[in-house]
Amino acid sequence: GAVVSQHPSWVICKSGTSVKIECRSLDFQATTMFWYRQFPKQSLMLMATSNEGSKATYEQGVEKDKFLINHASLTLSTLTVTSAHPEDSSFYICSARDQMSRSGANVLTFGAGSRLTVL
Amino acid sequence: AQTVTQSQPEMSVQEAETVTLSCTYDTSESDYYLFWYKQPPSRQMILVIRQEAYKQQNATENRFSVNFQKAAKSFSLKISDSQLGDAAMYFCAYRSALNMRFGAGTRLTVKP
């Protein structure tokens, strides 16, 4: 089945530094990937839709200059948290769908998530 | 705007019994999909079951089934013969061409 790999799974950084999180579709191509943020004991909040070869579409209230998204290939999207601050500490999850799959074209496969702690 | 509501923050079920998790949604779109995802302590989101809105027949997947009431915008999940491994957070999700929304989640506890 479709697999999405997310790296790193856990990262600690100092305030003011930037952190990059990668999301890879391992056995399928994804023209669209999605990035979410999840606070402890809360639901997933869609941050942005990452589009291969074009600009990401950000949800209302999400700072595009803070959360840079690059979807340079059909199997890789990256989320860069720029000038991170403690309030950016959270669990970030990506997802993608195998649009070529007849049975799974409308199913999202999720990465395992990345826990960011900003000191 | 599309919203997904899960009115049960927590539910508990005895092992081998049946439990139903509730979900309602609000939308003016006609073409959409509904999902139930499970998030165990590992936090990996796992697809449990999906339903295409244009299909009248309720989806089933082994011990998991849904009661999809399109007119009422209701999409409940029934877990039969509950197992200890079913314990997790369950999220109801709505997806269309333009939107992706999750409910607040229901924490399911399975008692041995």
Image (cartoon, coloured by chain):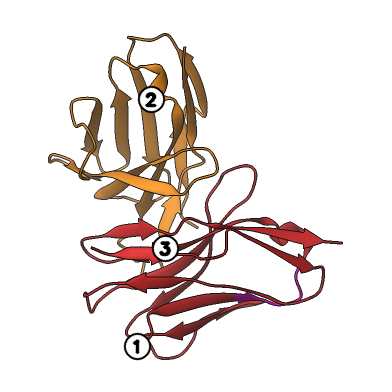
Chain colours: A orange, B red
Q: Is residue A28 above or below residue A78?
A: below
Residue A59 inside the magenta-drawn segment: no
Q: Quadrant of the C terminus of chain B?
A: bottom right
Q: Which mark is residue B93?
A: 3
Residue A51, can we see it?
no
Callout 1: SS = loop
Residue type, mark 1 in image? Ala
The residue singled out by tag 2 in the image is A88
Q: Is residue A15 above or below residue B45?
A: above
**Residue A101: image location, x then y, percent:** 36, 65
Q: Which mark is residue B2?
A: none
Inter-mark Cα distance, 2 to 1: 40 Å
Q: Give the tally of numbered discs.
A: 3
Inter-mark Cα distance, 3 to 2: 24 Å
Q: Please indicate whether residue A104 sits to the left or right of residue B48 in the image.
A: left
Give the mark, 3 or 1, whose residue is nearer the N terminus: 1
Inter-mark Cα distance, 3 to 1: 17 Å
Q: Residues within 10 Å of mark 3 (few under 14, many from 20)?
A: many
Marked residue chain, label 2: A
Give the residue drawn at x 49%, y 64%: B6
The residue singled out by tag 1 in the image is B71
Residue type, mark 2 in image? Asp
Magenta-colored span:
B78-82
Query: Which is in the foreground here, disc 3 or disc 1?
Result: 1
- Tags 2 and 1 both on a single chain: no
Give the residue drawn at x 27%, y 72%: B27
Q: Is residue B3 above or below residue A29?
A: below
Give the residue drawn at x 22%, y 45%: A59
Check if mark 2's residue and mark 1's residue have beta carbons within 8 Å: no
